[in-house]
Amino acid sequence: MNFEEKLNKGFELLREKDIDYALDVARELQKEEPDSHEAYYLEALVMQQLNQWSHSIEAIEKAIKLDDDNAPYYNLRGNVRMQLEKLDGAEEDFDKAIELSDTSAAHRNKVMLMLMTDRGQEAIPYLIERIKKDPKDAENWILMGDMINKGGQPDKAATYYEQALKIDPENDYAKRQLEGEDEL
């Protein structure tokens, strides 16, 4: 099996929640090709799954050092920094990920960070703008529904979950939110 095949196998194992074996693959790849940023990224994702934030940040920083032009790496480091409550650094990482690749995930993470730092008044218009730019992104509709629900307006929140299900009919989270609404 060549490097690329092993790497793909590692990501597949991670998706299947075979965490230990995925970590073994990441470390084996690092030994084979020490300058492979992808192998460190895989390790960082594994460590994130294990909630081993300090190990995850070490691995993702190695990946960024080897490839500093990769939006998912900055997005992951931002997530890990949020877990470590290094919120200023997290926002810088999300901004860098957005600058590099305007990814929806980084925008959503930035909204979550705004909420965590008591900037909800910024988060709402930011997310509305994201919904306008990409109305087919079900996750943005769900996030807005969650924000509205937390604000005490479950009926209005339900309309956002319903819209998310129109886009992604198999979204279990949105279904559960609406089922919970029916029970109230």
Image (cartoon, grey):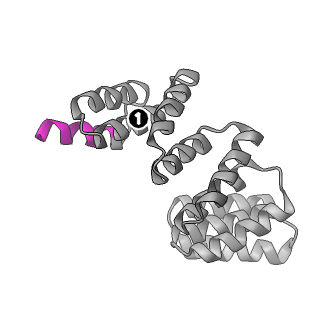
User: Residue sitting at 38 percent across and 38 percent down?
Assistant: 171
State which region is magenta.
Answer: 174-184
Q: With 157 as the anchor, is 183 left or right in this view?
A: left
Dominant SS of magenta comes to: helix
Observer-nearest of 114 and 63: 114
Residue 24, image x, y percentages: 66, 77
Visible residue check, residue 36: yes
Is residue 175 rendered magenta in the image? yes
Q: How many marks?
A: 1
Element under label 1? helix
Q: With 58 as the anchor, is 141 left or right in this view?
A: left
User: Residue sitting at 65 percent across and 39 percent down?
Assistant: 103
Q: With 137 as the anchor, is 45 left or right in this view?
A: right
Observer-nearest of 141 and 45: 141
The relative height of residue 134 versus residue 8 in the rendered view (above or below) is above
Disc 1 residue crowd, few under 14, some 14–19, many 20+, Cα 10 Å: many
The relative height of residue 38 versus residue 32 in the rendered view (above or below) is above
**Figure quadrant of residue 3:** bottom right
Circle 1 residue: 144
**Figure quadrant of residue 23:** bottom right
Instruction: Quadrant for the C terminus, please.
Output: top left
User: Residue sitting at 29 percent across and 40 percent down?
Assistant: 151
Instruction: Quadrant for the N terminus, please.
Output: bottom right
Residue 8, image x, y percentages: 69, 57
Observer-nearest of 32 and 79: 79
Q: Amino acid at mark 1?
A: Met
